[in-house]
Structure formats: C-alpha cells, structure tokens
Amino acid sequence: MHPHKNPRPPLTAKMVIQAVGKVLRKSKTKPNGKKPPAEEKKQYVEPEFTKIRVLEFDLKELVVLPREIDLNEWLASNTTTFFNLINLQYSTISEFCTGETCQAMTACSTIYYWYDERGKKTKCTAPQYVDFVMSLCQKLVTDEEIFPTKYGKEFPNSFESLVKKICRYLFHVLAHLYWAHFKETVALDLHGHLNTLYAHFIVFVREFNLIDPKETCIMDDLSEILCSPLPTPAPSTAAPAPSPSSQNHVTER
C-alpha cells in the first residue's frame, strides 16, 4: 500500500532549498561577464572559495533514505528538487553563457555532445545544450506516467534509468558552471550556494549510485573537498615549515 503521493514527502533539506532559492532570487549584482583565463580555470578548488557554504551540516544524513519513505518517492522528490535548484543556479549566469562565449558545452578537458532521441550526435553551444537538458528534465519530472503524484499510481519500470539520465545531465550543467562561469558566480556572491548545491548533489548520487564515477571523475578534486566536513580550526601554535619535497609535490587526476 503506497502512501498518498500528493504532495511528495518534504525533504529534510528544506532549509537548504529555501536558503538557496531565496538568495538566488534576491541577488541583483552584475559581474563583468569576462571569460576567465585558462590558468585561472581551477579557481573553484582554492580554499578561500571552497570554504564558503550556505550552511554546514552532515550531508550523509541529509540524503539517506528515511525509513518510512518509499525509495522511488525519495528519488523522485530529490531529483525534482535538484532539477529546480540547478536550473535556478544556471539562470543567475545565463546571460553570460552565450553561443559566443561558450561555443561548446565544456568542463575541464571534456566536451559534451547532445544525443537526440534517434541517437544522433550533435555538437552545440553550451546554452543550447543546457536548454536541451532543462527541457528534457522538465518534460520528465512533470510527466505523471514517469513521476506520478496521484495516489495509487505506480512508478514505471524505467524510472531508475530515467533518474540516472537526469542526474547525469544535471552534473554536466554543474560542471560547466564551475569550469566556465565560476568567476561570474563569485562576482554575484553565489559561490557558497553553488558549493552547497554541488556537494549535496554529489553525496546524493553517490548514495544511490545514480552516476557512473567515470562520468564525475573530471570534478573529483572539487568533490573530495566539498563533500568533506570543513576542517576545525587548529590551536594557534606555530606549525613546522613544510619540507621542500612536500612543497614541490603535485598530484594529478
């Protein structure tokens, strides 16, 4: 016997959703819209930016399936929420993501191509790609046959695979936001919201194995930083100077 499906069970992340949505809508500052130089493209992993979050909480507890809620209901509720928040986050910099500034949908060394319903591969600009993503996600999450909200309506057998598809596309949008528009996000003072949203999303998809790690590995450096608790300030004692070898060591992913 399924619980009543209208409305969906409220997320325990309600405070995050409200905080992100409220601040994103209120922001009126305009960044300069210039593209970051190649050498600055990983500005988003610098400590001065990664330490900025909306709220500090246990992400694992936030995403774990509540005992009294059906798995598909939980996946549906969270997936719909992430779609809405990522769409909202992208909208804050959309005027700077144009066919001229972002001629391809890029993230790190990856170019994403769009595949239509017939499997035809198309290289498109980033705004075109994001429009395809958001249109598809909107179509799926509002389809009663796929994301049912009425009592007694069953989820289709293809539900999990469609959720995985949505999450994979949403990850592409998040990765592009960091790679191509982080400077603009910082100028809008919204990087704390982006960091919180990204960390929440990554912990969620990892919890339910919704995205192949090979897909998300391009952002592993950021994921490992943001999905770890903020370090507790150490006592004010003089730290030993780092050895020359530790200063020169570079880790590559």
Image (cartoon, rainbow, N blue to C red):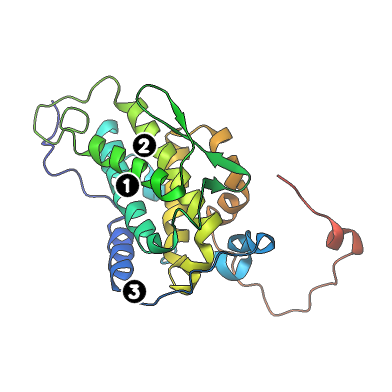
Q: On the image, numbered disc 2 is attached to which residue?
A: 166
The amino acid type, in three-letter code, at marker 2 is: Ile
Residue 49 shown left or right of residue 25 in the figure: right
Cα distance, mark 1 to mark 3?
A: 20 Å
Q: Do the residues labelled 1 and 3 touch (CB within 8 Å)?
A: no
Q: Can see residue 80? A: yes
Residue neighbourhood size for the residue with mark 3, other residues' Cα within 10 Å, grouped as few (<14), some (14–19), many (≥20): few
Q: Earlier in the sequence, mark 1 or mark 2?
A: 1
Extreme residue in the right direction: 244
Q: Quadrant of the N terminus?
A: top left
Q: Where is residue 150 in the image (x, y as percent from the top left)?
A: 9, 34
Q: Element type at marker 3?
A: loop
Relative height, residue 125 to residue 144 (above, below): below
The amino acid type, in three-letter code, at marker 1 is: Phe
Relative height, residue 8 to residue 226 (above, below): above
Q: Element type at marker 2?
A: helix
Residue neighbourhood size for the residue with mark 2, other residues' Cα within 10 Å, grouped as few (<14), some (14–19), many (≥20): many
Check residue 83 in the rendering and tell me which mark sits there, or answer none.
1
Residue neighbourhood size for the residue with mark 1, other residues' Cα within 10 Å, grouped as few (<14), some (14–19), many (≥20): many
Relative height, residue 38 to residue 30 (above, below): above
The amino acid type, in three-letter code, at marker 3 is: Ser
Q: Which of marks 1 and 3 is nearer the N terminus?
A: 3
Q: Which of marks 3 and 2 is nearer the N terminus?
A: 3
Q: Quadrant of residue 159?
A: top left
Cα distance, mark 1 to mark 2?
A: 8 Å
Q: On the image, numbered disc 3 is attached to which residue?
A: 27
Q: In which quarter of the image is the C terminus?
A: top right
Cα distance, mark 3 to mark 2?
A: 27 Å
Residue 113 shown left or right of residue 71 in the figure: right
Q: Do the residues labelled 1 and 2 touch (CB within 8 Å)?
A: yes
Q: Where is residue 198 in the image (x, y as percent from the top left)?
A: 46, 53
